[in-house]
């Protein structure tokens, strides 16, 4: 699983005696309480794998080691950082080279026997006799950079080159083999993969508000201030009347549009085009409101129309007769024919009630 809380909170709710806990970060930022929980967690029989450039001083003192910057110990002709394993069974002849030009650390006191004391008076304090450490990896100058430190019934695995575990390096050459061998020292058991101590982790809040909320007196003052601000805004909004803006009603441009279209047709003098469009509009109305098929406007169609629209048959015949006789079969019509056709249409609309629809 992936813990998203600090080690103290996680270990308190997930105490185990046979698991692995993996932390990979640039700098392990853990307080003294977290370190004490780590020690108790390892003492109970768990393994903690940490790959980081820097460790809390409390943890270094607990483990009896010291991380030392070894950048000046890199070979002068090296194109990067060279590392290898100490065990001849998994050690390679060429080693593993990483193109890395910045930080590199060695572990001092990596192979020494040490008696360590957890120095405080809590129930977790005890004298832990740590067995001989095992150096698992070294750099090009034979400085320890990967070590196993038995601790109680469990162990700490300290690794000082976390960039080896990045996605970028995992895709290079045989780097994935190096990572696989590093993790193979952990036994096959339940494993916790840390997400809390990652650099730039969104799970950690570093804002001033975190400090304010962590102190009870400050947090109460903060909540009271928020409550007072809400009360002030509530009463201030009731006492202050907003200015009502003057809204200009939208202009009715339909009449102007109609005049423009009318002027266009008047200048063109295309009376037949106007009549044809009026007939198309009428037929659409008949299909929409009376559900009639308008492809054939013969006598049967007109009879159905008169029945459904309650319009006099003479009015209907006048509309369709003018259109069939004087408009549809000719290319041009005069103004008098258009006026006659329009008069017949208006009479039909008036009798049928479609004039307002």
Image (spheres, helix red, strand yellow):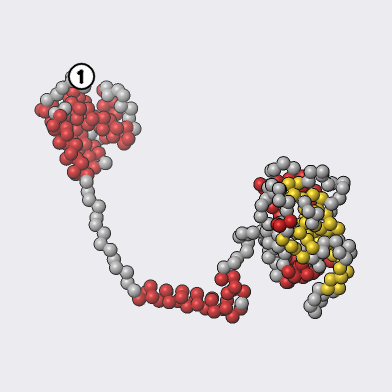
Reply above or below: 160 against 228. Answer: above
View extreme (top): residue? 329
32 to the left or right of 153: left
Reply above or below: 98 against 11. Answer: above
**Dot 1: what SS?**
loop
Q: Quadrant of the C terminus?
A: top left
Q: Position of residue 176 (x, y in %)?
A: 74, 45
- Residue 190 visible in the picture: no
Quarter of the image where one finds residue 264? top left
Seen from the viewer's position, the closer of residues 28 and 102 is 102
Q: Residue at x 80, y 57 (%)?
A: 144
Q: How many marks?
A: 1
- Residue 113 visible in the picture: yes
179 to the left or right of 101: right
Q: Which residue is mark 1?
A: 329
Q: Residue at x 59, y 70 (%)?
A: 210
View extreme (left): residue? 336
């Amino acid at each position: 699983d992936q813990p998203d809380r600090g080690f103290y909170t996680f270990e308190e709710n997930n105490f185990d005696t046979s698991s692995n806990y993996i932390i990979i970060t640039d700098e392990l930022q853990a307080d003294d309480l977290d370190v004490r929980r780590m020690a108790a967690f390892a003492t109970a029989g768990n393994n903690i794998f940490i790959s980081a450039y820097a460790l809390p001083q409390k943890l270094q003192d607990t483990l009896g080691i010291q991380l030392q910057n070894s950048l000046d110990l890199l070979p002068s002709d090296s194109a990067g950082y060279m590392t290898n394993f100490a065990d001849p069974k998994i050690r390679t002849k060429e080693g593993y080279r990483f193109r890395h030009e910045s930080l590199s650390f060695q572990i001092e006191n990596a192979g020494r026997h040490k008696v360590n004391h957890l120095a405080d008076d809590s129930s977790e304090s005890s004298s832990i006799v740590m067995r001989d450490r095992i150096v698992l990896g070294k750099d090009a100058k034979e400085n320890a950079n990967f070590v196993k430190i038995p601790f109680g019934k469990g162990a700490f695995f300290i690794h000082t080159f976390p960039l080896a575990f990045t996605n970028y390096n995992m895709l290079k050459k045989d780097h994935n083999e190096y990572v696989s061998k590093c993790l193979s020292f952990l036994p096959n058991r339940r494993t916790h993969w840390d997400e809390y101590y990652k650099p730039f982790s969104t799970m950690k809040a570093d804002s001033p508000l975190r400090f304010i909320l962590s102190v009870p007196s400050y947090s109460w003052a903060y909540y009271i201030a928020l409550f007072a601000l809400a009360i002030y805004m509530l009463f201030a909004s009731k006492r202050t009347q907003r200015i009502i803006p003057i809204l200009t009603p939208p202009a009715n441009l339909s009449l102007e549009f109609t005049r423009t279209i009318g002027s266009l047709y008047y200048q063109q003098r295309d009376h037949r085009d106007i009549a044809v469009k009026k007939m198309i509009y009428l037929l659409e109305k008949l299909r929409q409101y009376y559900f009639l098929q308008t492809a054939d406007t013969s006598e049967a169609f007109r009879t159905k129309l008169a029945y459904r629209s309650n319009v006099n048959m003479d009015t209907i015949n006048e509309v369709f007769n003018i259109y069939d006789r004087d408009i549809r079969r000719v290319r041009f019509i005069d103004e008098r024919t258009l006026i006659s056709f329009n008069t017949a249409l208006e009479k039909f609309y008036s009798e049928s009630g479609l004039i307002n629809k």
